Image (tube, rainbow, N blue to C red):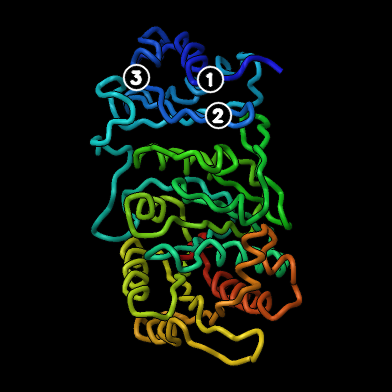
Amino acid sequence: MSDKITEQKILSSLSDVKLPLENGEFSGKNIVEAQAVSGIAIKDGNVIFTIEISPSISAYANALRATAEQAVDALDGVLSVTAIVTAHREAGTQPAGHAHNHSHGHSHNHSGGQTGVEQMASPARHIVAVASGKGGVGKSTTAINLALGFAALGKKTGILDADIYGPSLPRLLGINQRPETRDKKLIPIDAWGLKAMSIGFLVEEDSPTIWRGPMVMSALQQMLTDVAWGELDILVIDMPPGTGDAQLTLSQRAALAGAVIVSTPQDLALIDARKGLNMFRRVDVPVLGIIENMSYFLCPDCGGRADIFGTGGAEAEAARMGVPFLGHVPLEMEIRKTSDEGTPVVASAPDGPHALIYKQIAASVTRQLDTHSDGMPAIIME
């Protein structure tokens, strides 16, 4: 094995890569001198980093990315390289990692609707996002089991982990490997009959992702458009929790067919779920329904039922908001255990009672998608 790959070696290799000028000539400052390189992560010989450039030279982003990847790939011991190019500021105007840059490489339409917002090319016939107004309600577990439910119905299904800061898909799938690259596209990981992609496949599990909002959006856009998804019927997006900039922009630009909201029954969670639902409505994304997660607990010893977080709150909220109620999912040790072990319950116990619940929800969502004539993808919220 070669000498250890270090951040300093990567920066040294990138010091030969020039920024393009507005006429397309690559004769400007080198990208390190211009303080355009940030977010370097190294995992078992696999390298990922971000290059921030001015919007005025964004037309040359692909050429710059290829040159930078070739420079790092030439280092001894590097197995693969992924460069993420984001164009939202003048390179060199402030140090990379500065916390107060709010200049975005995209525009928001806060008046509602998708008018004037450039949408990404859709990698699937339908995109479904699983989202939640807050964390801790079981969004990611719901997303992976719902995706497996679609696959059980015979749908060619993919899942994208859009939580850049807290990716959980590698753990949920029991996978810790780097995607291969072919023809400048990442090859999604095959797991349990799904095609899967997550930033967690590219960085160490305990490595923090210290990126600004526009960098996150560039990474998400590349995972949507620069991944060889193939011909998918449905792509499930496991959205980050909350209703911030990344969630709003992705909702506007990812050509969503609809959104499923995941909430627990308690009032506090329902307040946040309502915010998420209204965000989707604001950008004209259909809400396909609400799932009540951790709805009740059945004692494995005595069979008694306990409504730990209350019950029926999400169902009542769905009726109040005029959206479909998709079902109750119990607080069940088997669902938690299989998720922690990387063997989701719909895959590990496909004929069990818990798998049946997720399959029924998937069938309900599928019926709604099939009634839409626009063929747009859908998003599911927690």
Asked if disc 2 and disc 1 are in contact, CB closer than 8 Å, the reply is: yes
| Residue at disc 2, secondary structure | strand
Q: Residues within 10 Å of mark 2 (few under 14, many from 20)?
A: some
Give the tally of numbered discs.
3
* Camera-side mark, 3 or 1: 1
How far is mark 3 from mark 2, CA to CA? 19 Å
Mark 3 lies on residue? 35
Camera-side mark, 3 or 2: 2
Dot 2 corresponds to which residue?
Answer: 42
Residue nearer the viewer, 299 or 114: 299
* Relative side of 165 to 154, left or right: left
Whether residue 205 is visible, yes or no, is yes
The quadrant in which the C terminus is found is: bottom left
Label 1: element kind: loop
Residue 378 visible, this angle: no
Which amino acid, by three-letter code, is at mark 2? Ile
Q: CA distance from mark 2 to mark 1?
A: 8 Å
Q: Nearer the viewer, residue 300 or 111?
A: 300
Q: Which residue is mark 1?
A: 6
> Residue 179, how many percent across, how many down?
65, 38
Q: Are marks 3 and 1 in contact (CB under 8 Å)?
A: no
Q: Nearer the viewer, residue 182 or 93?
A: 93
Mark 3 crowd level (few <14, some 14–19, many ≥20, 10 Å Cα): some
Secondary structure of the residue carrying tag 3 is loop
